[in-house]
Image (spheres, grey):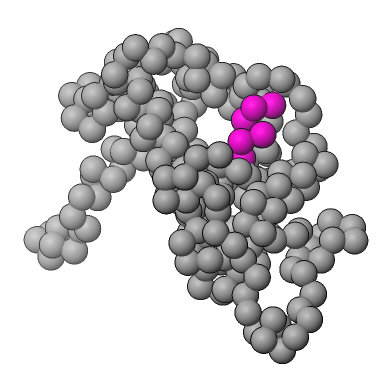
Amino acid sequence: MTEKRAQRRPGGRTARNRENVLRATAEMLLHEGYEHLTIARVAAAAQVAETTVYRRWPSKAHLAADALSELARTGNPIPDTGTLEGDLRALLGQVVALVERPEVRRVILTVVSLTADDDEVVAAKDAFWEARFAGAAAIVTRAVERGELAPETDPYELIEDLAASTYFRLLVTGRPLDDRHVDRSVELALSRQGIRAATMPGRPRHRRPTTETDAATPHYRSSPHRNGATP
């Protein structure tokens, strides 16, 4: 018995509690909506004490943000296709597939509409977006290592360029998130980095080199918004 206890991974119960709490939160959010989410109900569904929940999540806004981040992380692993364009296309395709689920769309619309006067809500929103961008930044890091992007490329700006119109359509216009939209978003994000999308008809990824020196030089440019510059 002593030997078995010694082999248990430290923090195993804590990890299980976190998993159960986030699962219960996600189910409640998706099936009942944010307005019906309470710490007490989540604790009961996860079979943990309310104090266990409050110890890690000080408010239901933080809890909802963490649950949505976990849902996005497990359902949308960061793609690694071997090219920047392939990664961006796969990433945006995952985002579109996720937000087009009616229950996910409803939760996002509700959370976005929450008051900005509540410091806890603002902090929870910031934590959610920070987690999403941190994961996607790996795409930019790999592209820099392959020489597809300049070393000073800002991951946040590139991912914002990629996903901005998707969330604008989701939250404002309601226009379709179809394949044409994905193609156009990828094309625009790449164009901001001086790259032409290879999969767009008649548009090569890079301009054709005219000299040996030109051929050996990576064709990227610095974003005009880096280093604090404004449009």
> Residue 119 at x, y = what percent?
29, 19
In this picture, residue 191 sits left or right of residue 62: right
> Residue 72 at x, y = what percent?
52, 40
Residue furthest to the right:
202
In this picture, residue 193 sits left or right of residue 48: right
Count of residue discs: 0
> Relative to 208, is 69 above or below?
above
- Residue 46 seen: no
Q: Is residue 213 magenta?
A: no
Secondary structure that dominates the magenta span? helix
Screen quadrant of the N terminus: bottom left
> Residue 188 at x, y = what percent?
71, 47
In this picture, residue 190 sits left or right of residue 157: right
> Relative to 214, is 156 above or below?
above
Magenta-highlighted residues? 163-169
Closer to us: 157 or 51? 157
Residue furthest to the left:
2
- Res 195 quadrant in image: bottom right
